[in-house]
Image: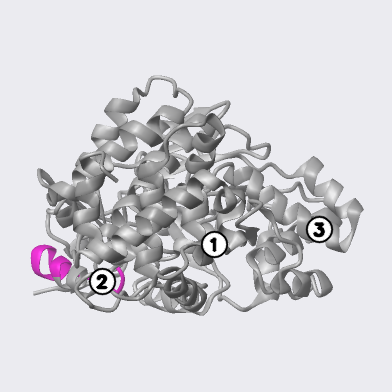
Amino acid sequence: MTIKLSQNALPQFSANVSVPSYKQSDLKAGIIHFGIGNFHRAHQAVYLDELFNAGTDHEWGLIGAGVLPSDEIMRQKLKDQDWLTTVVEQDSGHRKAYVTSSMIDYIQPGNAANTIARLADPEIRIVSLTITEGGYFIDPASGKFNPQHPAIAADAANIGSPKTVFGLILAGLIRRRSEGTPAFTVMSCDNIPGNGHVTSDAICGLAALIDPVLADWVKQNVAFPNGMVDRITPATTDRERNFLATEFGVEDNWPVFCEPFKQWVLEDHFPTGRPALEKVGVTFVEDVAPYELMKIRILNGGHAAIAYPASLMDIHFVHEAMEEPLIRNFLTKLEREEIIPVLPPVPDMPFDQYFDLIIRRFSNPKIGDTIQRLCQDGSNRQPKFILPTTADRLRAGDSITGLSLVSALWCRFCAGTTDSGKPTDYLDASAERLKIEALKAKGDPKAFLAMTDIFGDVGTAPVFVESFSRILRTLWDKGARETLELYLENKL
């Protein structure tokens, strides 16, 4: 027998499902969050839930917001269960299910007037975002905000009825300025180096298109703390819904499954206040950059490294990829020889220990993270997670064989088939162009590197061009498995 998730049903859940000790009705809104996806509900919402369960900071309840059609789908699913989410943590020696109630409302996506009004509410002191790496209107080659993007130009021309998340945030700030309300803090929770700076560039860049005085006001009055967030959180499918119903008796429209590990490192820059997140494990630091770089290069770069050889070898789950010695050893050699050596030190975090932790997390068989998830959005992820390390090593004159292999594997994957001939199914805003250029690259590897918006100067560096071209030809001639063997034998 299963119980449908709702506020009224919480007392009925069995002892093996934890429920909030606080009342949702006792929370007051203090945070609006754009991007109510799985990661947010397994990360920020969980930290707040733990804080509320401790009996404190109840004025920091979450309100959801969004701009995409998928946001409305999520809104309806969560509305049907009183904004509750069931979170299931799993690894080989641990399994725990609990219900979070830190969200108290969800603004209807597409309703700009209502969204702006809620953003202008003086009780809202933090606006946070989880909109993925590709949502910041960044030019991949330069790494800078692109003010010429049509969506940004449209918002600049009609800031009273914006369509983008940055337009909405800016419109809310404009309203607060006109009403004499202090600006809220804008906090990015995405995996982007200097995510606070990137968010500031986007909002100030949009403001500058409207009025330079407005841009200066934003720079002077709005805080954009940088932060590093971490928790592996796969997509939800019927597999997870059925498991939750069978094992825990909970019927949840959109549960979240994740690993037990979570981490959040934040710069403590919140002029209008913040919840006492340090009480539930958040680390506040003066400079988050070393932590951020460590995580993005080692963990996110590691995901990007194993995704494409695993896909080419028809491996479905991430933990299955880690059970394949060729992939596990490839990742270890790449990280220890090329990625980790160019990283600056991180306080109290030896890289060997951190990488060993990453290996254990990638090998977790319980959360069902898929290779397909890791493969998506490569045109945004490669310039953020892989190519900066390549650029660092090129500048230092160091070997880039492993990193060239990562880029070549991505190109081979984008050609559309695995080594066995199965189609590669992936989500990417540039998917069609990637396939066209990857197929050209079979005969002329430089064709793929000519996408300067992705590869930038790395794509024209002679050492990289030669290494990438040679390895790509090897992948087409011998396949991913034999190419990895050659790399591990130092024969590539």
Q: Earlier in the sequence, mark 2 or mark 1?
A: 1
SS label for mark 3: helix
Q: CA distance from mark 2 to mark 3?
A: 45 Å
For the residues labelled 2 and 3, say whether their Cβ atoms are less than 8 Å apart.
no
Q: Nearer the viewer, residue 30 or 410?
A: 410
Q: Quadrant of residue 156?
A: bottom right
The amino acid type of the residue labelled 1 equals Gly
SS label for mark 1: helix
* Residue located 23% across and 47% down the image: 486
Q: Quadrant of the N terminus?
A: bottom left
Horizontal side of residue 475 vs 102, given as left or right? left
Place of residue 387 in the rendered image (x, y in percent of width and height, measured from the top left):
50, 48
**Badge number at residue 197:** none
Place of residue 298 in the rendered image (x, y in percent of width and height, measured from the top left):
37, 39
Place of residue 448 in the rendered image (x, y in percent of width and height, measured from the top left):
50, 65
Q: Nearer the viewer, residue 115 or 323?
A: 323
Residue with the mark numbered 1: 134
The amino acid type of the residue labelled 2 equals Thr
User: 445 above or below 3?
Assistant: above
Place of residue 377 in the rendered image (x, y in percent of width and height, measured from the top left):
45, 65
* Residue located 58% across and 39% down the image: 226
What stretch of residues is rendered in magenta? 243-255
Residue with the mark numbered 3: 207
The amino acid type of the residue labelled 3 equals Ala
User: 277 above or below 210?
Assistant: above
* Comparing labels 3 and 1, the label whose residue is closer to the camera: 1
Q: CA distance from mark 2 to mark 1?
A: 25 Å
* Comparing labels 2 and 1, the label whose residue is closer to the camera: 2
- Tell me if mark 2 has few (under 14), some (14-19) or many (20+) residues whose alpha carbon lies within 10 angstroms of its own: many
Residue with the mark numbered 2: 418
- Tell me if mark 3 has few (under 14), some (14-19) or many (20+) residues whose alpha carbon lies within 10 angstroms of its own: many
